[in-house]
Amino acid sequence: MTISIWRYSHFLLALISSLFLLIASVTGVILAVEPIQHQAQGYAIEDLEKVSLATVINNLKQNYDEVFHVEVESSGFVKASVLTTELETLDVYIDPRTGEQLGIVPERPYVYRFATNLHRSLFLKSIGRFFVGLISFLLFLISVTGLILLIKRQGGLKRLFSKVQKDYFELRYHVVLSRWFFVPIIVLSLTGVYLSAEKFNLLPDASVMNWEKNNIVPTAKYNSVGEIPFFQNTTLEHVRKIEFPFSDDPGEYYQIALKDKEIRVDQETGGIIGSASYPLVTLASRFSMALHTGEGSVVWSIILLLASASILFFIYSGFVMALRRIKRAKKTAALAAMPDKDACEIIILVGSETGTTYDFGTRLFHALNVVNKKVLLTELNHYSTFAKAKHVIVLTSTYGEGEAPTNARKFHELLASVRQPNDITYAVVGFGSMEYPDYCKYAIEVDGQLQKLENWTPLLPLHKINNADFRALQDWAKLWSEHSKIKLSLQPESKRQTRRKPSTFKVIERTELNAENTFLLKLKPKKKEKFTSGDLLSIIPKGSDVARQYSIAKMDGDIVLSIKKHKIGRCSTYLSELNNGDIITAWIDENPHFHFPEKTTSAVLIANGTGIAPFLGMLNENRNSKIRLYWGVRYQSSSKIYDHYLEDHTKNDENINLYISHSREGKKKYVQESILDQREIILKTMEEDGVIMICGSLAMQHQVLDSLESMFKDCSDLNLELLEQKGQLKMDCY
């Protein structure tokens, strides 16, 4: 609830001020360029602390007929307003050490004058200045609420600068840039508020200066200004402006504006006629202006330019995020508004690994809502008692060798412990591929378990759907509608098809089968391909229209696959018969959720069998991360085909440690048991913001997750869901 309040406040403030922030940011970018361009003229004077006022004044009097004033800019440029011997009034940049003219002060370009007026007042004068001040204050509030959301997202203030979980581009860089530019944006907003308050006289009057007269009358007179001690002892480093006397008449004086005060100096006697310190408001205003504009510092100007540009990105990314949230809310509006589980007549239980089956469940849910049925759609792992349930529909896929999907792995245990209060009619729909020997095996298991329950009656026999055929699901829906007497019509959703461009790869190495019928295949792309370890190589074997995917190990630009040959596996059999020099056609599918994090300091990699493939590439590409690889195989001889890729890293890199478990010989230990023995190491990895990556069979994944859950039982700040959300738990199992 709290985070919703902050998110709503953040979004509402941004929405209200977005147009003005857009204008302020664009003009801010333009104005940040001005100090950089100004400094590029190269008139800055070095060692101003070595140049005395006496030197400057003498040089100017020798070179010009009359001097009106001299100004030392924050950029280090020295600017003089003079009357030349040709009686021409000029503003020039000078070298104060020689009086030499370096260049004419140019008229300020129109683009900067236009941008300044738009930035300060929107061309609306006082009303515009008020809006600018208000928007600056709103920008401050937006930054503060954004920081609070960022802290909550990262898991606390101490983790503010920990790695950012990968997500879509706009969200990820909304977070990254907010960390980089929070301070500059806060400075821009607060100085903007201060400068606006100054324009509306909301601050003490800084124009009134209390001059203190010096009553001591010097008796000495100097032949030249250069002999006056004050001018000899004061350097340009401390000076802002020198106003020259109007004439040589006695009583006329120099008025010197220093950093913190102004002084009047008699031009004949060199006496200090009077002095006045600047009010604190004046100093604060000057400091705010320098911070807000970047004058005098190229580095700070560049930071302000990037900060202003980042605000433009925040506006864009914020609206993208909001639109995605709205679209997601629309798609799940019915789900969010679904009644309490104990008020629902129909329960849809889903087991889905890739999301396809869940998508079918969602469409079924919407179709039942259309006919005003109270329906609950939930995962098999969330099975519980349903007070008014009459019908239960189970939609589940099967992975690996008949294993349950991840979100169904607890269903058998729950089914044994939960008893429904009412008689239930049920139907089970299984999803899979007929090309695998364990076609819909998990759905068969679920149907068998439900048949054993006393008060459960099948409404329809088990229905199997091949290759996610939606038309087959529509046919089942018609049968279910006829038997349940509930009108039901499923509508397909149009999906945009993405074309994949196949590429060709040359076989450069294939190992013999090991004791587990596993082999390694090394391929070289015929043309340059962009990929990384953890991506997938998709291959369609002859006589099939379904692609097989294999996890990629990237080895110096080549692809290494770890493949298990199945007795009736078309693709694995085809690949096991390839010879060096053969050419195959395939394409690379990016798999970003299973890439090794760029900046992680430590990682725990867990695999069994052929699941080691992507980790071989990650070891090869590792630079500074501390990696522990836990790998399970059946026999000691099974690992020999991998020795070439493992030995160099494990023997020569102290940051890499390998733990191999053998389940069929020796101590007979599974990989999930090995990680339990390393509990402290894994917990330390999580504390260091490290990552756990799991690849291999789905059955192994379930066992490993169970082991991790038992490890985290006594750690209140660690759980699988949170780690997965933060990108610290990555899984790619099959």
Image: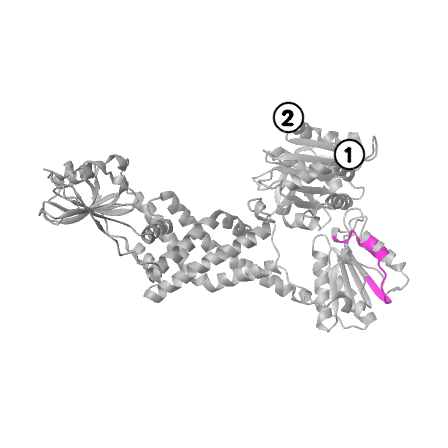
The CA span between labels 1 and 2 is: 22 Å
Q: Are marks 1 and 2 in contact (CB under 8 Å)?
A: no
500 vs 28, nearest the viewer: 28
273 vs 290, nearest the viewer: 273
User: Which residue does the image show at 20% across and 39% down from the upper left?
Assistant: 230
Q: Which mark is residue 572?
A: none
Whether residue 455 is visible: yes
* Left or right of 40 on screen, residue 520: right
Magenta highlight range: 407-427
Q: Position of residue 276 (x, y in %)?
A: 25, 49
Q: Position of residue 222 (x, y in %)?
A: 11, 38
Q: Which residue is mark 2?
A: 652
Q: Position of residue 178 (x, y in %)?
A: 50, 50
Tell me the quarter of the image containing the N terminus.
bottom right
At label 2, counting other C-alpha atoms closer than 10 Å, the crowd grade (few under 14, some 14-19, many 20 or more) is few
Name of the residue lying farthest toward the top? 652
717 vs 635, nearest the viewer: 717
Q: Which mark is residue 661?
A: 1
Amino acid residing under circle 2: Asn
Q: Secondary structure at mark 1?
A: strand
Queried whether the magenta region covers residue 418, the answer comes back as yes
The image quadrant that residue 80 belongs to is: top left
Whether residue 118 is visible: no
